[in-house]
């Protein structure tokens, strides 16, 4: 199977990956989606970042679920997500993880990283000029830029990030990636443009991918002409004003303009990319806490991150014939933006344009149906009452105590509801579903009613029973997801006039 390697850089990269995992879990796809195995590689020096930790937890649960249901008929969790070390033929000495480990960064100051004290007088003077100026450290103190600690990221200093991230090409992770890159595989890079880590990391990663042809790595010939896409996330949220923080909202636009100017000359201007997606939102609602990293840095999920995840799915569906690369240059680069039909403070499915609404509405509603049903107390109480649970393979209480259900599926479901709740309360918000309401869950579409029939919890049980009788399932894990996929498809068609 072809693979899509996703380099997710910085906090924005992690947050977009989180939304992508939710969409793939729901079975979201473009009309022409090619099946890919997704291999995320997160690049972020800030290991205590709570957004990174949440994304890692979500990806780990997704990977375990997809391993159990692979080959089944369900569209839920149908796209495989795997760690880099699990895709190759050679065993890796590294622990299984989705992150790229930056060396010599933890608790290190930039001047120590570049060995300032051991430089010649001329080199030291040049370095001090290139990295002159002051910044604010983690404790609110004004310090020379060259003295900054890097274990919470590059806090809005892409010039520092570009130096540190150049170790990327020499890392074990990059060598594993390149040695496992095959013809037909693709690469996608996710980064923000208004901070430090993402703005620095994007051009560094792209350059090293295209320059891999000059190395002795196994996949070098394929990487030179690889299909590479990227997402550039421009400012989309506000932050609180804090004089003791190095992060200032007023810098976002100027940094974006500077980065775009650089990209015009060195990224888009030289046809290094086959497809570049731009996204931003000038509606700045309630500001996020100004946290450069010491407080854990956990932001509520935002609709821009959902739309950004759609960019990855759109890229997966692009035809190879329009993505030709010759001698490391895209012959016909594609540039895309995202738009909505209406832009209220809280978006619903009907506020999206037709294709976005088609891609998101039915899959997200179906996954919501499944997780809302599974957390209803009636579910565990009805172990012996319904054929869909008692017919082999049984969905009994022993199965409900298994690691698959308790540690992976339920855990993912908890993250799914937290994601939906954060999206709905954010500004700009995305609130297409009415949480906690399984019989009237779609905010802008009420279920059909007639004198004889209205939609109830019992209809879900009935459709689950009906779908169970139609098919046979090799494992209870595959059965659980498959019957919910097919049953919710029928229910959406009958009661909501939605094609699943």
Image (spheres, grey):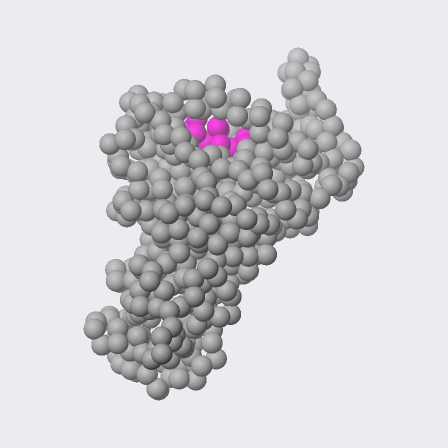
- Residue furthest top in the image: 122
Q: Residue at x 31, y 78 (%)?
A: 462
- At which x and y percent is residue 200? 54, 30
Q: Nearer the viewer, residue 25 or 492?
A: 492
The image quadrant that residue 448 belongs to is bottom left
Q: Nearer the viewer, residue 482 or 32?
A: 32
Magenta: main secondary structure = helix
Q: Residue at x 36, y 46 (%)?
A: 355
The image quadrant that residue 210 belongs to is top left
Whether residue 203 is in magenta: the answer is yes
Q: Nearer the viewer, residue 429 or 497?
A: 497
- Residue furthest front in the image: 451
- At which x and y percent is residue 58? 47, 57
Q: Residue at x 26, y 62 (%)?
A: 72
Q: Residue at x 38, y 73 (%)?
A: 449
Inspect this view and state whether residue 86 appears: no
Whether residue 427 is in magenta: the answer is no
Image quarter where the C terminus lies is: bottom left
Inspect this view and state whether residue 134 appears: yes
- The magenta segment is 199-210
- At which x and y percent is residue 163? 56, 27
The image quadrant that residue 483 belongs to is bottom left
Residue 393 to residue 444: above or below? below
- Residue furthest bottom in the image: 384
Q: Nearer the viewer, residue 97 or 452?
A: 452
- At which x and y percent is residue 488? 34, 67
Q: Is residue 236 left or right of residue 277?
A: right
Q: Is residue 296 left or right of residue 17?
A: right
């Amino acid at each position: 199977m072809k693979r899509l390697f996703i380099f997710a850089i910085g906090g924005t990269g992690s947050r977009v990956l989180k939304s992508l995992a939710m969409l793939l879990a729901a079975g979201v796809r473009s009309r022409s989606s090619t099946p890919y195995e997704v291999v995320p590689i997160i690049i972020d020096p800030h290991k205590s970042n709570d957004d990174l930790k949440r994304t890692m937890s979500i990806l780990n649960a997704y990977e375990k679920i997809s391993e159990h249901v692979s080959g089944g008929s369900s569209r839920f969790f149908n796209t495989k997500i795997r760690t880099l070390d699990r895709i190759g033929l050679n065993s890796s000495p590294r622990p299984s993880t989705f992150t790229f480990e930056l060396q010599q960064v933890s608790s290190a100051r930039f001047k120590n990283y570049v060995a300032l004290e051991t430089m010649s007088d001329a080199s030291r003077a040049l370095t001090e000029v290139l990295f002159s100026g002051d910044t604010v450290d983690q404790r609110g103190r004004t310090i020379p830029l060259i003295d900054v600690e890097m274990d919470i990221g590059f806090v809005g200093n892409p010039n520092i990030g570009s130096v540190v991230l150049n170790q990327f090409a020499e890392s074990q992770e990059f060598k594993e990636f390149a040695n496992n890159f095959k013809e037909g595989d693709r690469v996608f890079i996710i980064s923000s443009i208004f901070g430090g880590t993402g703005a620095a990391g994007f051009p560094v990663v792209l350059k090293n991918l295209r320059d891999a042809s000059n190395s002795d790595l196994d996949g070098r010939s394929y990487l030179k002409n690889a299909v590479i896409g990227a997402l550039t996330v421009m400012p989309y949220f506000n932050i609180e004003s804090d004089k003791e923080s190095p992060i200032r909202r007023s810098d976002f636009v100027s940094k974006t303009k500077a980065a775009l100017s650089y990209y015009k000359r060195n990224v888009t201007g030289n046809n290094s990319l086959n497809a570049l997606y731009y996204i931003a939102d000038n509606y700045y609602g309630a500001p996020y806490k100004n946290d450069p990293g010491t407080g854990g840095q956990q932001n509520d999920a935002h609709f821009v991150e959902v739309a950004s995840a759609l960019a990855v799915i759109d890229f997966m569906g692009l035809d190879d014939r329009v993505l030709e690369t010759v001698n490391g240059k895209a012959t016909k680069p594609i540039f895309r933006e995202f738009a909505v039909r209406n832009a209220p403070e809280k978006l619903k499915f009907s506020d999206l344009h037709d294709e976005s609404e088609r891609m998101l509405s039915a899959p997200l509603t179906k996954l919501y149906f499944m997780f809302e049903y599974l957390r209803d107390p009636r579910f565990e109480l009805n172990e012996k009452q319904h054929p869909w649970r008692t017919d082999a393979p049984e969905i009994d209480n022993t199965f409900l105590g298994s690691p698959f259900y308790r540690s992976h599926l339920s855990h993912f479901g908890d993250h799914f509801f937290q994601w939906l709740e954060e999206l709905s309360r954010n500004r700009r918000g995305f609130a297409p579903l009415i949480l906690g309401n399984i019989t009237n869950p779609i905010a802008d579409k009420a279920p059909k009613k007639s004198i004889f029939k209205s939609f109830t919890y019992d209809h879900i049980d009935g459709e689950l029973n009906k779908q169970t009788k139609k098919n046979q399932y090799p494992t209870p894990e595959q059965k659980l997801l498959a019957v919910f996929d097919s049953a919710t498809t029928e229910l959406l068609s009958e009661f909501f006039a939605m094609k699943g």
